[in-house]
C-alpha cells in the first residue's frame, strides 16, 4: 500500500480493513503498507503499527507497515515495496481504492489462464453521493456521477478499441495484478508525473503481455471539486505528454515488439495529438460552417456529404454501444443505481457529452504544452481526499463497519491451493473448471 500519509491518514486504516476482510484471494494474502511523510504523525503511525501487530486477521492474513524515510513520491514507495516482496505475484491499488470482493480472483484467473505478465482491472466511482448539487464555482453538480459514467465508457468500450490497435492492454496504475519478477525488472520513475504510464511504456517496449479485465472492478474516490479534478487531470495530461516524448524514439527502434505493437504505441501515444487537432477542425470549425451551408451534396458534393454521414455514424455507434452496455449491467449495481448510471452514460457518451469533455481535454492539452515548453512543470501534486466518514480510531476500534474510504495498495501473493477453493465461493471464475496453482503467500503493498 504506497501511501502519502498526511493526505491519506483519515482513510488508510479503513482501506486496510477493507482489503483484509472483503477482498477474496486465491491463497494466503499478506498486506504491505509503505508510506512516506515529511513530518512525523505519531498517533497515526502508532495505530498503523498496532494494526501490523494484530494476529487475528481472517484467513491468517498478515499486515506489515514500513515507513520509507527517503521517499518523496508514490513511485519511490512502490520501488521500496518491490524490494521487500518475495512472492510470485503482486497487485497494486491506489490509496482511494476499495476493490470488489472477487476482483482479485478475476485478475488471477485471467493472468494464469492466458499466461499474461499483467492483468489490468477497471475503476468506478464509489462516492456517488458526494458533489451531487454543487452551488459554488468550484463544486460541479453531480461530478462523481459524471466521472463514473466517463470511466464506465472508457473501461467497457474505449479500452477495448485501444487494445485492437496495441494488440494488448496496458498498465493504468491501480487494480493491476503483476508477476513480481516482471514488474521488479523495471523501476518506477520518481520524476514522472504519471509513473504508471512510464512503467506501462517500458514494459510494452520489453514485449510484456498485458491484458484488460474490465469485470475486475475497484471503487475509487472522485475529486471533491471541479478545481481538484482540474489539477488531477492536468497532472495526468502532463504525464502522458512528457512520457510520450521521452519514449517516442523507442517506438520505431528494432526490438522485441511486433509491427502491430509498434503501430499501436505510435497511435496511442503520438497520433492522439494529430487527432486532437483534426477534431478541433471537424467539430468546432466544420460544424458551425454546416449551419450556414447544410451538409448536402448540392452544397458540398457527394464525397464531402458521404464523409460527413460516415463521421456521424462513427460517433453514434459508440454512443449506442456504451448505453447498451450500461443497460445490460444495471443488475451489477442494483436497479436504482444501475439505472442512474445508464442515464449518465447516455449523457456523457452522447455527442454533446463528447463535445464537453473534448473542450476540457483540449484546454488541459494546451495547459500541458505550455508548462512543458516553458519548463514550469512543478513537482508531483497530491490529489486531496475527502474526509473520512468516521474518525479512523473509532473505525478501527469498532471493526471499521463503515468501509467507504480508501488507500493506495499493492498486493503480492501466491497460493498452493486450487483456485476458488480456499477463500472464494460461488465466484464467476470458479465456474471455468480450471485448477490454478500459485507459488507462495500473498502480500498487499
Image: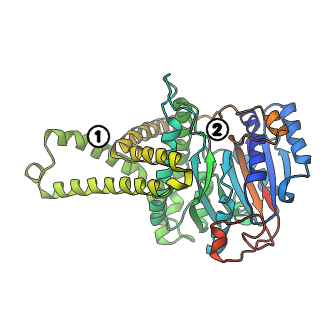
- Which residue sits at x=29%, y=40%? 284
Image vertical order of residue 362 relative to residue 409, above or below: above
- Which residue sits at x=51%, y=45%? 336
**Does the rendering let one see residue 49?**
yes
Question: Which residue position is annotated with label 1?
Answer: 284
The extreme top residue here reads 136
Q: Residues within 10 Å of mark 2 (few under 14, many from 20)?
A: some
x%, y% of residue 294?
14, 44
**Does the rendering let one see residue 71?**
no
SS under mark 2: loop
- Marker disc for residue 380: 2
Viewer-side label of 2, 1: 1
Q: Is residue 350 left or right of residue 370?
A: left
x%, y% of residue 13?
78, 41
- Which residue sits at x=71%, y=46%? 408
Q: Residues within 10 Å of mark 1 (few under 14, many from 20)?
A: few
Amino acid at each position: 500500500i504506497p501511501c502519502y500519509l498526511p493526505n491519506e491518514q483519515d482513510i488508510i486504516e479503513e482501506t486496510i480493513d477493507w482489503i483484509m476482510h472483503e477482498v477474496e484471494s486465491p491463497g494466503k494474502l499478506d498486506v504491505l503498507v509503505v508510506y512516506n511523510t515529511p513530518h512525523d504523525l505519531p498517533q497515526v503511525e502508532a495505530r498503523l503499527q498496532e494494526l501490523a501487530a494484530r494476529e487475528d486477521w481472517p484467513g491468517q492474513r498478515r499486515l506489515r507497515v514500513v515507513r520509507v524515510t527517503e521517499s518523496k513520491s508514490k513511485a519511490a514507495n512502490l520501488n521500496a515495496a518491490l524490494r521487500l516482496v518475495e512472492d510470485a505475484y503482486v497487485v497494486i491499488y491506489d490509496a482511494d481504492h476499495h476493490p470488489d470482493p472477487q476482483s482479485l480472483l478475476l485478475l488471477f484467473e485471467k493472468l494464469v489462464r492466458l499466461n499474461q505478465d499483467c492483468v489490468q482491472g477497471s475503476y468506478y466511482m464509489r462516492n456517488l453521493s458526494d458533489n451531487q448539487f454543487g452551488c459554488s464555482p468550484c463544486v460541479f453538480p453531480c461530478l462523481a456521477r459524471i466521472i463514473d459514467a466517463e470511466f464506465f465508457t472508457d473501461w467497457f468500450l474505449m479500452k477495448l478499441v485501444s487494445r485492437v490497435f496495441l494488440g494488448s492492454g496496458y498498465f493504468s496504475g491501480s487494480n493491476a495484478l503483476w508477476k513480481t519478477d516482471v514488474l521488479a525488472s523495471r523501476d518506477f520513475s520518481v520524476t514522472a508525473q504519471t509513473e504508471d504510464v512510464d512503467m506501462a511504456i517500458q514494459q510494452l517496449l520489453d514485449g510484456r503481455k498485458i491484458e484488460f479485465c474490465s469485470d475486475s472492478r475497484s471503487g475509487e474516490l472522485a475529486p471533491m471539486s471541479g478545481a481538484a479534478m482540474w489539477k488531477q487531470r492536468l497532472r495526468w495530461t502532463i504525464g502522458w505528454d512528457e512520457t510520450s516524448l521521452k519514449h517516442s524514439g523507442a517506438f520505431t527502434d528494432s526490438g522485441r515488439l511486433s509491427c502491430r505493437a509498434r503501430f499501436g504505441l505510435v497511435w496511442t501515444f503520438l497520433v492522439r495529438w494529430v487527432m486532437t487537432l483534426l477534431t478541433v477542425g471537424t467539430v468546432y470549425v466544420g460544424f458551425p460552417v454546416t449551419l450556414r451551408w447544410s451538409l448536402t451534396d448540392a452544397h458540398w458534393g457527394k464525397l464531402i456529404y458521404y464523409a460527413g454521414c460516415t463521421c456521424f455514424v462513427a460517433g453514434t455507434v459508440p454512443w449506442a454501444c456504451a448505453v447498451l452496455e450500461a443497460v445490460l449491467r444495471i443488475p451489477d449495481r442494483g436497479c436504482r443505481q444501475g439505472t442512474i448510471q445508464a442515464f449518465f452514460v447516455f449523457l456523457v457518451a452522447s455527442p454533446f457529452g463528447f463535445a464537453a469533455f473534448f473542450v476540457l481535454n483540449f484546454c488541459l492539452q494546451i495547459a500541458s504544452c505550455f508548462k512543458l515548453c516553458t519548463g514550469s512543470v512543478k513537482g508531483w501534486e497530491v490529489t486531496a481526499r475527502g474526509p473520512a466518514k468516521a474518525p479512523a480510531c473509532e473505525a478501527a476500534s469498532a471493526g471499521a463497519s463503515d468501509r467507504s474510504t480508501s488507500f493506495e495498495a499493492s498486493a503480492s501473493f501466491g497460493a498452493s491451493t486450487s483456485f476458488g477453493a480456499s477463500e472464494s465461493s460461488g465466484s464467476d471464475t470458479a465456474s471455468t473448471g480450471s485448477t490454478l496453482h500459485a507459488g507462495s503467500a500473498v502480500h498487499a503493498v
